[in-house]
Image (cartoon, rainbow, N blue to C red):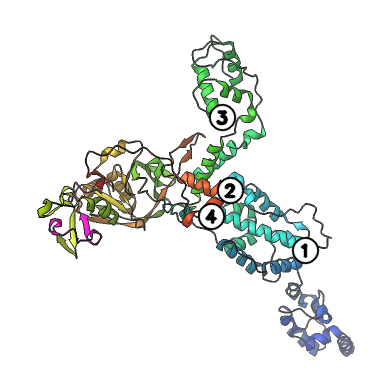
């Protein structure tokens, strides 16, 4: 057979005449370089779809003058996408414009703004970096969704007006400044989402600048983490919303806020009254009047034996209507209730003061972690109440006594580590100086003598100096600095801490404890301590905690409570403790419960948060010194020593 040499010659001529293959043989390593740097245009066709690239198998075939049986399968098509990655993105000019703007110097108004810009500059500095909110045609669906979410900020207790968003109305892709406008929009939205996330987690104000006694631990998001997370989130609006507190009470407050501002489901379908109630006398239980029949029709109450008689059923219907419309539920129809019955547009509008109170309490939920834990202890100071919560349900509740106005209980969070049965009380310096030393007085008149130190004996106080116990009557109190003495009270029936204390170490040096002054728990306003929290039924609190953590039964806890002497019981797992200041709660049925602004924090927060930030920024030493309404002074105690027990 003579055909094989003919085919071999033909193949040799074909390969020699093919410039594409000839070049590839001389530049067989160019494929790997092309992934890292753009190729010259003259070589771009080497990796184009359908080109032939030499492989070891093809080389062996040519040596035997044989045509490969399946050349299509040997074509390195997979290398084409690798080169395609280097092609400039259609949004790359926008990214470069963004990078240029972010690289320009600017004056940071706060550390937060400086950090935000640094994060954005780092993100957009990467070539071909993915834009988040725009493309060459304008706002993307992601950008529109995030803008819509930020515009609803007021429904979450923030202010949409605080966030600068781009106005893309009338944008033209063919305009000469289209790239610049898109870059500005990308930057504006990125700043807005970072500000929103920061504010949603409690960053609008620094609580400690409002009062030194407001010391929550804020968990503010890091701008770079937020921006990087947004780059791969399929629903950026939902991610942004997740920075809002997830606590059920926050959601109840939010819904009530929307309702009182005239929103909610009812706003979409305004009520149309069947009849109108004309002006007239106040309608109440027991009155017979022709208007009562109209009132029955208005509230869908059956007529009964006498349609014009205001009976119990109608009174209950009126009370329900009044409660739903945020007015006093007294069951009487006077001018105010008539206006609500006749004007459905007024049905959901709350008073400005009520709305402000909701906003302040929503802000305080931002001070708490998103996950408080499956088991924790919380004290709400204005409510004078302690709760132990397990799996989102309170399992123990008790009354507490909190700090006086001058010695406030601080608002903060920490972790309980120890329960101490039969504790010692180490007297704080403030009490040494202010409430013990003034009662140590000289005796003997002009001829000298000793010192009246009965305050120590009366309260079983001991004194140590240099680590050695000394008799207070033997000291020369003219020369002794009481601050350098160790004053303490041993365990016993007169100990101001009672039989047990609950320790969660903190810089404020406050804790929860028992007290011998049980009568204080009967008071409505229980602000009597030096800052610590005295707990009613502390044996029950100890039993709940130790059963959960140490599997103690009630009998073991009770035994330690009755006979323990400086017995420290360390917890296996620290228990979170949250000291809070909520002055409003929305109940499950939509009704509202309020508590007094014991320390005036509502007023100071309103000045800083709602009435404008100027007063907050200009406050002396960063502390707002708004005056607090005076409280009546309590009657002086008949026992001049009694206030020593107010620890």
**Disc 2 crowd, CA 10 A, few/some/many (<14, 14-19, 20+):** many
Q: Using the image as rendered, state which of residue 231 and residue 62 is in the foreground.
A: 231
Q: How many marks?
A: 4
Query: Is residue 153 among the parts visible in the rendering?
Result: yes
Q: Which residue is mark 2?
A: 158
Quote the CA–CA distance across marks 2 and 1.
Answer: 32 Å
Q: Residue at x 54, y 31 (%)?
A: 326
Q: Which residue is mark 1?
A: 179
| In front of the other: 415 or 450 | 450
Callout 4 secondary element: helix
Secondary structure beneath dot 2 equals loop
Q: Earlier in the sequence, mark 2 or mark 1?
A: 2
Residue 63 at x, y = what percent? 79, 90
Residue tagged 4: 617
Which segment did they paint magenta? 471-497
Q: CA distance from mark 4 to mark 3?
A: 38 Å
Observer-side mark, 1 or 4, equals: 4
């Amino acid at each position: 057979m003579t055909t094989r040499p003919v085919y071999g010659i033909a193949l040799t001529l074909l390969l020699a005449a093919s410039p594409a293959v000839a070049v590839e043989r001389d530049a067989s390593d160019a494929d790997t370089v092309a992934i890292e740097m753009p190729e010259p245009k003259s070589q771009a066709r080497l990796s184009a779809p359908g080109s032939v690239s030499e492989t070891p198998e093809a080389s062996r075939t040519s040596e035997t003058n044989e045509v490969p049986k399946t050349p299509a399968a040997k074509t390195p098509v997979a290398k084409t996408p690798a080169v395609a990655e280097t092609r400039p993105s259609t949004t790359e000019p926008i990214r470069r414009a963004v990078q240029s703007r972010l690289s320009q110097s600017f004056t940071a108004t706060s550390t937060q703004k400086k950090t935000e810009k640094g994060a954005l500059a780092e993100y957009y500095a990467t070539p071909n970096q993915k834009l988040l909110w725009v493309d060459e045609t304008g706002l993307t669906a992601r950008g529109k969704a995030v803008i819509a979410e930020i515009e609803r900020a007021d429904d979450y207790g923030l202010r949409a007006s605080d966030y600068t968003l781009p106005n893309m109305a009338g944008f033209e892709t063919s305009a000469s400044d289209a790239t610049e406008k898109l870059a500005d929009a990308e930057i504006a939205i990125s700043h807005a989402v970072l500000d929103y996330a920061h504010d949603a987690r409690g960053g609008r104000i620094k609580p400690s600048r409002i009062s030194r006694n407001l010391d929550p631990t804020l968990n503010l998001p890091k701008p770079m983490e937020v921006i990087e997370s947004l780059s791969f989130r399929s629903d950026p609006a939902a991610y942004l919303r997740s920075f809002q507190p997830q606590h059920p009470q926050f959601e109840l407050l939010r819904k009530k806020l929307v309702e009182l501002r005239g929103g909610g489901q009812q706003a979409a379908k305004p009520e149309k009254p069947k009849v109108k109630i004309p002006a007239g006398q106040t309608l109440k239980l027991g009155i017979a009047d022709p208007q009562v029949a109209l009132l029955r029709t208005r509230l869908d109450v059956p007529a009964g034996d006498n349609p014009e008689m205001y009976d119990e059923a109608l009174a209950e219907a009126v009370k329900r209507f009044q409660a739903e419309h945020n007015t006093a539920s007294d069951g009487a129809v006077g001018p105010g209730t008539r206006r609500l019955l006749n004007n459905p547009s007024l049905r959901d509008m709350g008073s400005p003061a009520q709305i402000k109170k909701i906003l302040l309490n929503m802000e305080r939920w931002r001070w708490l972690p998103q996950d408080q834990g499956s088991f924790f202890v919380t004290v709400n100071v204005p409510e004078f109440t302690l709760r132990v919560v397990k799996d989102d349900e309170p399992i123990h509740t008790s009354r507490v006594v909190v700090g006086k106005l001058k010695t406030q209980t601080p608002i903060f969070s920490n972790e309980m580590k120890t329960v101490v049965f039969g504790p010692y009380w180490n007297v704080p310096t403030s009490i040494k100086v202010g409430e013990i030393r003034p009662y140590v007085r000289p005796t003997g008149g002009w001829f000298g003598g000793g010192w009246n130190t009965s305050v120590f004996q009366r309260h079983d106080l001991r004194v140590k100096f240099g680590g050695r116990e000394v008799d207070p009557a033997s000291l020369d109190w003219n020369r002794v600095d009481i601050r350098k003495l160790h004053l303490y009270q041993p365990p016993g029936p007169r100990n101001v801490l009672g039989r047990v204390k609950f320790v969660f170490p903190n810089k404020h040096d406050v804790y929860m404890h028992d007290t011998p002054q049980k009568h204080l728990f009967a008071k409505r306003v229980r602000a009597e301590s030096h800052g610590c929290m005295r707990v009613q039924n502390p044996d029950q609190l100890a039993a709940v905690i130790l059963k959960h953590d140490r599997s103690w039964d009630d009998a073991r806890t009770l035994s330690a409570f009755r006979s323990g002497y400086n017995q420290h019981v360390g917890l296996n797992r620290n228990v979170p403790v949250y000291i809070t200041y909520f002055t409003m709660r929305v109940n499950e049925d939509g009704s509202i419960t309020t508590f007094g602004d014991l320390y005036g924090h509502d007023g100071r927060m309103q000045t800083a948060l709602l009435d404008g930030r100027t007063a907050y920024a200009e406050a002396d030493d960063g502390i707002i010194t708004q005056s607090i309404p005076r409280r009546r002074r309590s009657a002086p105690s008949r026992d001049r020593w009694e206030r020593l027990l107010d620890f």
